[in-house]
Amino acid sequence: MHPLESLLASYPFLLADGAMGTMLMDAGLERGDVPESWNSLHPERVRAVHRGYIEAGSQIILTNTFGGNRFRLQRRGLQDRVAELNRAAAQLVRAEADIAPHKVVVAGSLGPTGEMLQPLGAMSFEDAKVAFAEQASALAEGGVDVLWVETMSDLEEVRAAVEGARSVSDLPLVATMTFDTKGRTMMGVKPVQALEMIRLFKPVALGANCGKGPDELEATIQAMHTADASMVLVAKGNAGLPEFIDGEIVYRATPEVMAGYAVRVYELGARIIGACCGSTPKHIQAMAEALRAHLA
Amino acid sequence: MEQILKEIREGIMVGDADLVPQKVQQALDMSLEAGHVLNDGLIAAMGEVGRLFEQGEYFVPEMLVAARAMKAGMAVLKPFLVSSDVKPAGRIVTGTVKGDLHDIGKNLVGMMLEGNGFEVKDLGVDVAPEKFVEVVKSGEVDIVAMSALLTTTMTNMKSTIKALGEAGLRDHVKVIVGGAAVTGTYAHEIGADGYAPDASQAAALAKSLVA
């Protein structure tokens, strides 16, 4: 039994982690810097973020590789460092997981290419698949337990990611999409549509991440759970929407608000619960405490 | 006469980029005026597309194919618009701000603006304030439309407005902003002339600013 399945068999819910990008910005990442480059440039700062979430109670930690595919890195001239940066990212999480006080699953994050697939855009399915395979291969080499496709808007791109991953690795898969446009993804994919397509790939879990705010995510989980109560659902919502107040970026959803979302989304059927943009270990801690109290 | 315009509109609605230019040519061959075909064919259709987008019935794919069909029709129509002295609704410069590479939203805005009769010059992504200033300085620009997805890059909207001010150009243009992290409050804070939450409303906003 692989680590994620084993944890799912042992607990009613699993706590995933929270945001990486915003945490790295707090640690000094500047506008325009490439977060993935810090896996090599400032590995200790990346590890510190992972450690923060583990200490808050996270049982699944995602690698700092959201934009780590060839297409995204190419925009910053880093396309030749896909293998290096993804491997390093996986090793950093693995290092923290190995010294963690509880069992931690290392998840390799694969985010969108940023290009639209033909015929709407310029990218071929094959090129996307190869890019995801390249990333998955390096993540697997670096020691991840599971490959985690996230923040997708296009079902065909999910398919390219899954096929790419499966072409180089037997590691289990998780896939989440971002439903940020009137309850669907920006490409028009409905939550139930996403579930019906993604479950054909036999992932360990699927669901939603990012999006607009916790409210929309709850509706998404509810729709998915109603459609198929047998699927393990992932809910990784933003800490609300960002606002610019007095020159500072403030995410509206406080730890208390996120704690409420965590319990609601559990009740609606999510079993892997975490957070996305704007969240911090404090949010995860509040969510952990609320969920434990709820189930006590 | 109405029938051919209806066919043009329907062709755009379903994104038939082969049919629409054919029908536009047919309309011109029937001696319809270019401006009439533009307003009651292309612009009317894009207005409906924008409405469906705002209502959550059309999403990015439907918008893109509709815009493509419109563009194909526009390519046939353009020389006739020029020769019959039909002027664009306005001239707009679009761009995603410095440090930000996201462009889907900006591209949709550009499409809806063109679909409403504006002439659009797209500066692409990662556009420095100096570049916006340079383009405004060098030509007749009515509106500068900036996009940013990230909270970290949207501050470059403020920098661009400041740069326009320093170049003595702020009063020469209207500035509108949009993007996932941008809000009306932020737009007001930085001195922009307007904010729109989506491409369709951006077109309505632009129209109101040049009226």
Image (tube, helix red, strand yellow):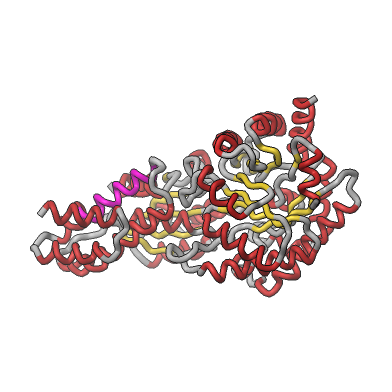
Give coordinates of residue B19: x percent, y percent: 24, 63
- On screen, residue B67 versus residue A137, left or right, reads left
Task: Determine whether B171 is above or below A263 in the image.
Answer: below
Q: Is B210 in front, or is B9? A: B9
Quadrant for residue A160, please give it: bottom right
Task: Determine whether B109 is above or below A140 in the image.
Answer: above
Residue shown at 62%/37% (left/top)?
A: A229
Residue shown at 56%/41% (left/top)?
A: A212
- On screen, residue B122 versus residue A269, left or right, reads left
Give coordinates of residue A203: x percent, y percent: 66, 52
Q: Is residue A127 visible?
A: yes
Residue B133 counted in the magenta span: no
What predominant SS class does the magenta segment belong to?
A: helix
Q: Is A145 in front, or is A19? A: A145
Q: Is A131 in front, or is B136? A: A131
Q: Write down the region rendered in magenta.
A: B41-54
- On screen, residue A267 versus residue A17, left or right, reads left
Quadrant for residue B56, please give it: top left
Q: Tally the marks.
A: 0
Q: Is A250 in front, or is B1? A: B1
Q: Is residue B195 visible?
A: no
Give coordinates of residue B9: x percent, y percent: 23, 53
Quadrant where the N terminus of chain B sits is bottom left
Task: Determine whether A159 is above or below A247 in the image.
Answer: below
Residue shown at 84%/57% (left/top)?
A: A94
Give coordinates of residue A113: x percent, y percent: 58, 62
Q: Residue furthest bottom?
A: A80
Quadrant for residue A248, please give it: top right
